[in-house]
Image: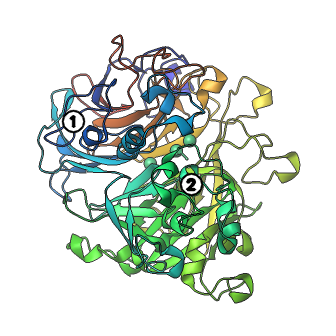
Amino acid sequence: KAMAATNPSTLSFKEIPHLMDQDHHVAEGYHAGVLIRWGDPVLPEAPAFDPTHLTAAAQLKQFGYNNDFLGYFPLERGSNNSSHGLLTINHEYVDRKLMWSGQDPEGIDSQTEEQINVEMAAHGHSVIEVKRDGDLWSVVPNSRYARRISTLETEIRVSGPAAGHDRLKTSADPTGTRVIGTLQNCAGGVTPWGTVLIAEENFDRYFNGATLPPAEERNYKRLGINGKPDYGWYRFHPRFDVAKEPNEPNRFGWMVEFDPYDPTSVPVKRTALGRFKHEGANVIINHDGRLAVYAGDDERFEFVYKFITKNKVDLANPAANKDLLDEGTLYVGKFAADGTLAWLPLVFGQGPLTPENDFHSQADVVIEARRAASLMGATPMDRPEDVEPNPVTASIFMALTNNTKRKAEQVDAANPRATNEHGHVLEMVPPGGKGRAAKHEADLFTWNIFVLCGNPAKPEDGARYHPATSEHGWLSCPDNVAFDPRGRLWISTDGATKFGYADGLWAADVEGEGRALTRHFYATPTGAEMCGPFLTPDGTTMFCCVQHPGDDKDSTFDAPSTRWPDFKEGMPPRPSVVFITRKGGGEIGG
Ligand code: FEO
Ligand code: CA
Ligand code: CA
Ligand code: CA
């Protein structure tokens, strides 16, 4: 009885403490296993992983580097099969210092063409088939669903208002409709018709361009293209040199959709959803059958967006939705101190989105969505990462990871702390009611702050949680969010290590007595970021991604801070997908 008074959460697992060491840790009574690692086979003829002899040919058949988003798809499209399905996983970027022996972390000019091609092959996405046996999961070898999408080879179609526009045309693609590859695939989402949405986030990091084309200078500068790329790809692939291919950057920064059940399906860049540093996109069916898509632009002082499709989702006929995301209305959020949230339409010809401001069509509006949103008066946020609707309550949770650059005079109700080191989670509530009653198309929502992250024992953090949150239950730098079948919130973090503890997973009720009582469930090995997470439809398995393990200061391929998960001399740390089950079965979280 006393326990119930102090811990009103429906989440009954025993919390783990804040800690950081070379291994990962999960709450007592759960099993956390490694499912697939960088370099493991994806395609049938993949060679064995040899970290001292990486080749592009091998990497194109192996699991890519740095897994961020993952989605689980039941083996039969639309079913609830929670023991056999497909996992679709983003490979966001590569960590050169941990990937290559003897690599100078600053030395992008010393890499060979083969090394560059390995890096391009390691970016993108993987589809694998996975199966449960007891408490364990494994990859099904030689699956007919297995697929690798890469920046080196995969052809991607462009659709929506910017498709074929002059600003997307290049010498290799005079149609402006076919792009090789996708970049910085960070978070993402799944659609009710069984496709996956993958985000293109920090694509500026690949483009060389000290001198920008005058027509695109304002556009590219807003996205961070500054002649100081983090990768040397442009030396062998001139499309990444803006001086040689001035429109190539306009071909990245989109949401990409593809069908994981068909390994020959051509992925599509859905330009109607706008171009910015897409963290991800998550969807929910509106009361009227249309689809609502929510998306964050992960940069300091950037915005949150929503998109409402013109047409309805057809659940009976998955193929009927193949162009659903090409038509609809894009909106950007404006948060008021009175707790209301106005959605401002980004529509060519409306308000300031006219030729006087260099918008000549909806293509211009989506290509420069950030500038359009600024002109409309959107609220600059503390780095919107994952933005995801709760399937039970229909309210939308947004992770605002941090913003150390917010000054005291820039504080507002929705971003209430200057020098916001720990971030916060914000809830947006549509009118109309819960579940399918919610009116996502409404121009006016309400909003509230769910938690202000940081250590509640340190007054200077200005943290705020449920008062019964334990000494283990507080967190920093929320990044991805997910919901279990009961609608409880799971949060993964990216940035705790600078406060001396490992990133990981926390969970909280969103309703009732335990609302906002966050509890600590899993910790990554040192240097890692926690990504995913994603639960099977029955809530008995949680998949999550350990991204960039060992990415600590002075940690290198030759002397890494951890060799997780292999712990073998000579083997570098390897980004990996982890499955978590309850020993003996049962619901994750209790
Ligand atoms: Fe790739 Fe915004 O994290
Ligand atoms: Ca992220
Ligand atoms: Ca998510
Ligand atoms: Ca992040």
Between label 1 and label 2, give the one nearer the viewer. Answer: 2
* Residue 442 visible in the snapshot: no
Q: Amino acid at mark 2?
A: Phe
Q: Residue furthest top?
A: 569
Instruction: Look at 33% across and 76% down and name the residue there.
Output: 323
Image coordinates of residue 225 in percent, x first then y, are 64, 56
* Residue 427 visible in the snapshot: yes
Q: In front here: 340 or 376?
A: 376
Describe the element under mark 2 as helix, strand or loop.
Answer: loop
Instruction: Look at 38% across and 53% down and name the residue there.
Output: 151
Q: Residue furthest right?
A: 409
**Does residue 102 appear left or right of residue 565 in this picture?**
right
The disc placed on residue 41 is 1
On whether ligand 1 comes within 8 Å of the CB at mark 1, the answer is: no
Report the Cα–Cα distance between label 1 and label 2: 30 Å
The disc placed on residue 207 is 2
